[in-house]
Image (spheres, coloured by chain):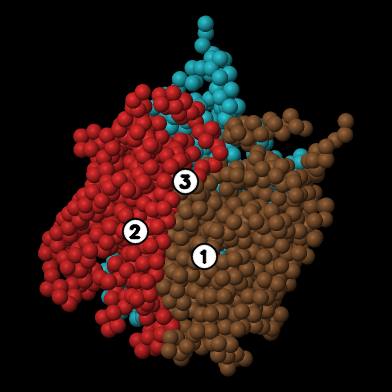
Chain colours: A cyan, B brown, C red
Amino acid sequence: IEKPKDLCDREKNTNVRISLPAVCFVWQIAMIILFGVFIRYNEESSPFWIEHRKANNISSDIENDFYFRYPSFQDVHVMIFVGFGFLMTFLKRYSFGGVGFNFLIAAFGLQWALLMQGWFHSLDYSDGKIKIGVENLINADFCVAGCLIAYGAVLGKVSPVQLMVLTLFGITLFAVEEYIILNLIHARDAGGSMVIHTFGGYYGLSISWMLYRPNLSQSNRLQGSVYHSDVFAMIGTLFLWMFWPSFNSAITDHGDGQHRAAINTYLALASTVLTTVAISSLFQKHGKLDMVHIQNSTLAGGVAVGTAAEFMLMPYGSLIVGFCCGIISTLGYIYITPFMEKHLKIQDTCGIHNLHAMPGVIGGVVGAITAAAASEAVYGHEGLINTFDFEDAFKNMTPTRQGGHQAAGLCVAICFGVGGGIIVGCILRLPIWGDPADDNCFDDEPYWELPDDEESIPPVLQYNNHMRNKDV
Amino acid sequence: IEKPKDLCDREKNTNVRISLPAVCFVWQIAMIILFGVFIRYNEESSPFWIEHRKANNISSDIENDFYFRYPSFQDVHVMIFVGFGFLMTFLKRYSFGGVGFNFLIAAFGLQWALLMQGWFHSLDYSDGKIKIGVENLINADFCVAGCLIAYGAVLGKVSPVQLMVLTLFGITLFAVEEYIILNLIHARDAGGSMVIHTFGGYYGLSISWMLYRPNLSQSNRLQGSVYHSDVFAMIGTLFLWMFWPSFNSAITDHGDGQHRAAINTYLALASTVLTTVAISSLFQKHGKLDMVHIQNSTLAGGVAVGTAAEFMLMPYGSLIVGFCCGIISTLGYIYITPFMEKHLKIQDTCGIHNLHAMPGVIGGVVGAITAAAASEAVYGHEGLINTFDFEDAFKNMTPTRQGGHQAAGLCVAICFGVGGGIIVGCILRLPIWGDPADDNCFDDEPYWELPDDEESIPPVLQYNNHMRNKDV
Amino acid sequence: IEKPKDLCDREKNTNVRISLPAVCFVWQIAMIILFGVFIRYNEESSPFWIEHRKANNISSDIENDFYFRYPSFQDVHVMIFVGFGFLMTFLKRYSFGGVGFNFLIAAFGLQWALLMQGWFHSLDYSDGKIKIGVENLINADFCVAGCLIAYGAVLGKVSPVQLMVLTLFGITLFAVEEYIILNLIHARDAGGSMVIHTFGGYYGLSISWMLYRPNLSQSNRLQGSVYHSDVFAMIGTLFLWMFWPSFNSAITDHGDGQHRAAINTYLALASTVLTTVAISSLFQKHGKLDMVHIQNSTLAGGVAVGTAAEFMLMPYGSLIVGFCCGIISTLGYIYITPFMEKHLKIQDTCGIHNLHAMPGVIGGVVGAITAAAASEAVYGHEGLINTFDFEDAFKNMTPTRQGGHQAAGLCVAICFGVGGGIIVGCILRLPIWGDPADDNCFDDEPYWELPDDEESIPPVLQYNNHMRNKDV
């Protein structure tokens, strides 16, 4: 009897016993060496802070940047590890992989990000060292977020080794793209609508396009959620939702900058929840809500005010942005994701196109418009300079031109995302990474020791398993 | 064959496909318009902060109110969305509704609260605008808490549209009641024992009384928890418990006020845990603990020190308050809740009477006594004025009289709760809101698309379902 | 028919209906009395703060210690209650006990810790009162952590009454040991590698040794996890992992001390994750990851930088410490825990030897080396004095000697842990505490009212239960 093709495929080797430890050890040792050569404490985290304080007439330890940013840092940290991690536990048999691989690649990514971003932004030319403080930690977490977004598109379809490669290149591309957008183009992007979400979204979608699996329906039985996995995912959703104001305000200007960014984000997110619920109910036959929308689209408003959160978007402006994004993102889940899968060969497990890519682009556009509309009447003279950093080489910038620069930044983010994703996708197609077979996707079984309760999974699954065995 | 009455009832229309989106859209658009007309940034969150700082000789950005209150704000935010949300996931088949509808009404409520409270407290008479900053965000979250408490009483028995109505009126009543208690009566209520918990508790109980369902026992099979839903609920409990010190100190005076409120709350809560465990064990046949008590009564101490947390309650005073509340609240679950259901026709799903209403009243009384006992010996001259705000129109207040005012405030909170609840309950009885039938209560099925694992619910339930189908 | 021995054993009395409430009430009342006699607010949490501020020329309320430490305090609080609590929910039928008893003993322990540590560290000799502020709350949480670590070793094998006794003595021993190490020996231990983790680890292991159960295999069927209980445990893991930088920096010096401790811990933890994953995969037949390692060993790096986090460990030094600890801790789970159970009669449910005891000792050694290697070139003159507190009686200390003192501190921690554990273990062997029989271990049934879904536990268990009943 001839073996059916998909059976051959099933025999794909998912054993990562050599490759995963090898990658982890080699890269971690590389990190240690590079940190040894390059990374030092900055003046606010070294014992010379006392001298620095006195020399700069700083009256109290409380003015150390640590106290301005540490609470926001911890909130961002929770978003990265619990927020993204638990949001990805929604699949019925991929919760370990969702939260566990998220943990792994975030922990690696933040080290590499400290180096990459450090070379671009925190290099002390006097001694060639990168000097780090709490703001670098936040930026490293931000940088990691881009890769975690990309993970959402390929969730359940890749091996941990592939994810490490995706992260290594993702962080590298991110740092370059960020440098171009923020420093060369001089766009502002406090909450990273462009730099993080647009880039991360298109990076992930392009990779997913390159890794298209025509027979993915073979693991259909595992693609949904179960009751409790949906509740776990709500942990992720809520921590992302609650701490998004900290995300968008974490690295904005001290004082009113952080204050305003938090308010705008808080409002945009509140508005998104209502329109998400409205659309979710309206487009279902019996008006029932869909957990996928509640878990994801409610966050789109936070993405879309990322760039403009520190500007004078005005409270009603934030509400409007959130209002539109809830609608667009939910409709994306209903119409665009199936369309992309069917016609564009892009399989987007978590729907990052609706949660990050589209809202990120909207955020970039809103940022450009808000910047272009800025005036001294609204910001005050000093406020305008301060908010848009019209200093040094850019002291002749005008708000209108700044709007153009913002738009240029958005284009760069999209290009890096798409281009980078295609290249990295090619690399990930090499048959050496231990990725799972089509009917083994969305399953923790290939990469995790599982407890004995497999038989407790829903009977409907057992039935499917049973049928599958018979088919074979 | 004549249809049995309960079958007719089963055919109640729970389709909210028109009403829910309509309410969400109309109210969100109303919010955008009202925010456009009324809401602006205050001087600490606008770019004019720089000028403001210089004009007021403020030496550092760190003195922006943002840095005094933002960490507490985020803790309160977690309590509202994860704390209340997950505490309500304990029912075996209503976890989506518990955490999801909590999310919806909180997101709507906070917007309406910013407006209502803004008109009373933050209106800038020079230009007729409400000027908001981080303190307004905290107060909006507080205001929402009152409605979420009320939701606890009717959990599983109402439609999302009813919840939106409950919230709209609840926020409105809250803002008026708060203005009367804090501004007109000049009572102090930092942690909201009266303003939030007493009001919210009686508001919810009155509504539940108006919506009494004599045949609720038809959904008995769904009224309990399952093992994992109880663990989910502990997430809610613990985040409420841990962050309650932030709740009670979030809007107290800068410096010692916030410091003392956090300490008192921390201590009261610790004490409550021990007496809750003691009573829970003592009143069960085999000394076994009941998860309902651990999930709820352990929080009663935080409610009951809400008013007095900023006063000189003394550490041992906090312990005593917590000690008593753990006992009273647990006994409430054992005796009062069943009594109320049987004899008073009040069905209180989460037992908010034991967790919010009673401890809130105790908190109001403790606050009145502590205020009346205040003296310059204990507070210092400036401390007394500062703590009780004996300034301007109230500069001739004495502690004894303040005690009386506190008691008056408590009465107002009860009246608003009961009266408001009865009126809103009447409105919610209209047959247009899509509420579930008696045997459809405590079930996500009417309002949520559920994953395919329904068959995995405990066999005991399947049996019940089976029986039910036969009965029909 | 003669009753088999294990059946007799099954009939052990686990009814704690008298003893548990009695212990809770008596101890809580004792706390109230002792707090009444001894505990008062300190000058930063009392209304005299205003006078204190003016007298000390403190320009702003923001310099109140509350604002330096409260965000870290709340993070530590989350680690104690959600971190430790949920980490212990991994067992399939002991999640209530894991998170619930953790809650109980932490709430009791922190009160007793405020007193014990207060007498040693915060006694105001002018009036014989302990004056507390936010730093005392953090230290109380720290003190409790030692006992929660010990709980990990005996998880599932003791009654709540035994846990209360374990905590009472544990806190007492902790406070004495801490006073000796920090004040008499003048060792530095910001993150408590020695004081908390080494002590707590050996305390728990010694108790577990004294309570050795030769027939524990009778409850083998309950010793593992189920799919969702492993996901719950990841909540604990991640909150511990994310907030560990706050743990290690919570009570370090204002300014650069807190800043540096946070950075070092962040880096050490990131590095640990990679080597944990590597070893976990490498030592499994098919390269699959083991959730036990991911849940626990990823945290070892945080333990091991506890002492040195505030020193100039350097970023690469932190990475190296984390690198080694990930390897050692994971190998400990693979080899040492089974060895200890088989040959040393130490049954360590959570593997605290690998997560706390060993990494704690490593942390002590790293601290000693880092201290001994300190120099003015690296710390600056003032920085050196400040970081190591070379003042007053210790103003003639040298870094080298400080290294010796650190090592001495480590020895004291081990001695107190082992010695205290043996004594307390003897007390806990008395047959009056209501501990469960061997085949009743790891089961919530003896101490908790359980919901009706027992039949929904995995069939494999039902089978076991069935077999058990037949055996009987």
Name the residue at 83% across, 52% down: B431
Marks 3 and 2 in Cβ contact (< 8 Å): no
Closer to the camera: disc 3 or disc 2? Answer: 3
User: Between marks 2 and 1, how big is the CA–CA gap?
Assistant: 24 Å
In the image, is residue C396 above or below residue C405?
below
Name the residue at 45% across, 20% down: A11
In the image, which disc is placed on residue B286? 3
Chain at numbered mark 1:
B
Residue B1: give x, y in percent of width and height. 88, 30
Q: Quadrant of the C terminus of chain C?
A: top left
In the image, which disc is placed on residue B325? 1
**Regarding mark 1 in the picture, which secondary structure is present there?**
helix
Identify which amino acid the numbered label 3 is placed on: His
Q: Earlier in the sequence, mark 3 or mark 1?
A: 3
Quickly name the residue at label 2: C144
Residue C329: give x, y in percent of width and height. 28, 43
Query: Residue C295 vs residue A369: left or right?
Result: left
User: Between marks 3 and 2, how big is the CA–CA gap?
Assistant: 29 Å
Q: Quadrant of the N terminus of chain C?
A: top left
In the image, is residue C431 above or below residue A56?
above
Quadrant in the rendering for residue C338: top left
Q: Residue furthest front?
A: C1
In the rendered image, is residue B374 in sight? yes
Name the residue at 63% across, 35% down: B461
**Regarding mark 3 in the picture, which secondary structure is present there?**
loop
**Is residue C210 or residue A377 the one in the foreground?**
C210
Query: Residue C391 vs residue A287: left or right?
Result: left
Identify which amino acid the numbered label 1 is placed on: Cys
